[in-house]
Each structure stands twice: as structure tokens, then as C-alpha cells.
Amino acid sequence: MSEIGFVGLGKMGLPMAGRLVDAGFRVRGYDPVDAARGAFADIGGTVTDSAAAAAADVVILMLPDSDVVDGVLFDGGVAAALAAGSLIIDMSSSAPLRSQEVARRLDDLGVGFVDAPVSGGVSGAVAGTLTIMLGGDDASAARATEVIEALGAVRHVGPVGAGHALKALNNLLSATHLWATSEAVLIGERFGLDPATMLDAINTSSGRSGSTQKKWPDFVLPGTFDSGFSLALMLKDMRIASDLAHSLNMPVALGDAAVQRWADARDHLPDNADHTEIVRWLRHAAADTAH
Ligand code: NAD
């Protein structure tokens, strides 16, 4: 049974690390939040008292963003604690150009790096049905796959950074169609249509998407707004995609407009709002125009 390190036991990291325990790995996990470490111990993980103490031949990161990834690796002592030949698997949704820089810095230490961000949400993490977008060289990708295939379907999409680029672009699409879906459903509602009836029809029509098939039925219609993916993290991903477009000198007019709208919602909702709560903000904004 091989040992792996896992840093970041949040909404996604905890169930993912738990699945690796269930798959037979000895997992050394770290998170600064006491409750997260306690929950991991409860499901059979070994808890460490620092990120550096979770160092192992393979270390998975499931952290909020590139700033935290850099901090954990290079200020938190993880990189220094790794033996040459170790492998970092960054499953966070990080920024691709920064991940390429991280890979170069680790390569100087003889440590490998792959990016392996995921889609599928907390429910996919719990069920082991995530889509994993893997970026890296063939040998590192094969080595990473032996571990992360316990978490979902692995797609090797290109060299280092490719996974993080694709993930950000996926979420730019996801956020844009959630906003568009929400505007359409609220317009229909004011006209007198029933939202559930609209979604049923759209879901066998050309306007369907993950927003009409999952997010609205599961989290908006019941009024629970509990997808487990925060608005702040969605906005972070959209900005990664937009920044990537600008760095490539590509026009991204609709994407930039979507970023603006989501940033507006973020300013008006609580810091810890779920991303599906943009519908609350849209309803609130629309209320002023009712007559
Ligand atoms: P989260 O905020 O629930 O978890 C992040 C964890 O990182 C927290 O437990 C936090 O304590 C920990 N952390 C922060 N700083 C740390 C540090 N210095 N050292 C160690 N741990 C630290 O976020 P999440 O929803 O689990 O998302 C994690 C990543 O996965 C993000 O990049 C997010 O964009 C991505 N993602 C999330 C979802 C989702 O549905 N929640 C889906 C796909 C991808």
C-alpha cells in the first residue's frame, strides 16, 4: 500500500482524500482548519500538523487558487521537504501560466508536476465520478493516473498547464450559461411561465446545459443554493479564463461581460455565498423593475 500526501481538506478535498483511503492508499492529510483535520481522521486518514509533514512520493494539492498553491509549496516548506523524484499533483483550479512556472521551479529541485483540476462538484467528489483534466508529460501523467483514477475519469489533455487552462475555460462556459439560464427563466416567470415547466421543456431542447439539467433543478428550484461551490471560487476561475484570453491577445467580449456581472453579484452577496445564489441577486435586481 503506497503512501501519498494530501493538502487541502475542504469541500472537495475531504471526500477526494477519503476515496483514496477507501482505494487502499495510506493518506497523510493536512488542512489548517481543525474541523477538516478531525473529519479526515474520522474517515481513516492520517493527519499531519503541517503541510510539509504531509510530504510523500506523491502529494496532491486541493487548494483555493495559485496564490495558496505557491505559498504551500515554496513558503510552507512542502517543496523543500520533497525527495528528488517526487511528484506534485495540483488538483486545485489554478492559473495555467502560474502552474507552468511552478513546474519549472519544482523541476529545478528534481520534482515532477502535473495539473489535474476537476469538474463534477462535491457530489462527483463523493461518488468518485469527477472529470479530471490532466496536464503533464506522458510519464508523469501515467504515474499520476495510477493514483487519481480512483477519483473519476482521467483525460490527459496536453502538457503542463493544459488541464488548468481547460478547467478555467469550462467554468467560464458554466458561469455564462448559468447567468443566461437564470435571466431566461426569470423572464419566463414574469410572463407567467412555471420555472419547472420551462426547464423540463428546455432540457429536451437546444437551450439545455448543465445549468438547466442540474444547477437549477437541484439547487435553485428547491431554494437550497447548496451546490458546495462558492461564488468567490467561480469568479476566480472566470478571471483565470479571461486573463488567459488577454495574455493570448484573444478577444473575449462575452466572457469579460460575464465576469463583470458575476463580480457585481459577488459585491452584493455574502462572502461565503454559493455560486448558485447569483439567482437571488438577479431576482433582487429584477424586483426593482416589476410594475
Ligand atoms: P474549500 O474552500 O472548501 O477548500 C479549500 C481548503 O484549502 C480549505 O479547507 C482551506 O482550509 C484549505 N487551505 C487554505 N489555505 C491553506 C493552506 N495554506 N494550507 C493548507 N490548506 C489550506 O474549496 P473547495 O470547494 O474544496 O475547492 C478547492 C479547489 O477545487 C478550488 O480551486 C476550486 O476552484 C476547485 N473546485 C471546486 C469545486 C466545488 O464544487 N466546490 C468543483 C471543482 C473544482
Image (tube, rainbow, N blue to C red):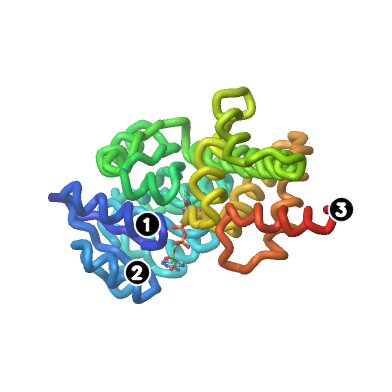
Which SS class for mark 2?
A: helix
Per the image, the residue denoted by label 2 is 36
Does residue 161 lie above or below 48 as drawn? above
Q: Residue at x 60, y 29 (%)?
A: 202
Does residue 254 lie above or below 93 as drawn? above
Q: Give the distance between the C-alpha atoms of the residues marked 2 and 1, in whole angstroms.
A: 9 Å
244 on left or right of 168: right
Q: Give the distance between the C-alpha atoms of the residues marked 1 and 3, in whole angstroms.
A: 47 Å
Which dot, 1 or 3, sits closer to the camera? 3
Q: Residue at x 27, y 71 (%)?
A: 48
Q: Residue at x 71, y 54 (%)?
A: 283
User: Could you tell me residue 263's position as x and y percent?
Assistant: 71, 57
185 on left or right of 11: right
**Circles 2 and 3: CB atoms closer than 8 Å:** no
Q: Residues within 10 Å of mark 1 (few under 14, many from 20)?
A: many
Q: Is residue 190 visible?
A: yes
**Circles 2 and 1: CB atoms closer than 8 Å:** yes
The answer to whether the beta carbon of the residue marked 2 is less than 8 Å from any atom of ligand 1 is: yes
For the residue pair 185 and 112, the one nearer the viewer reads as 185
Q: Of the numbered discs in the image, which one, if any, rests on residue 13?
A: 1
For the residue pair 59 and 36, the one nearer the viewer reads as 36
Residue furthest toward the left? 1
Which SS class for mark 1?
A: helix
Of callouts 2 and 3, which one flags the residue occurring earlier in the amino acid sequence?
2
Per the image, the residue denoted by label 3 is 291
Q: Residue at x 49, y 53 (%)?
A: 227
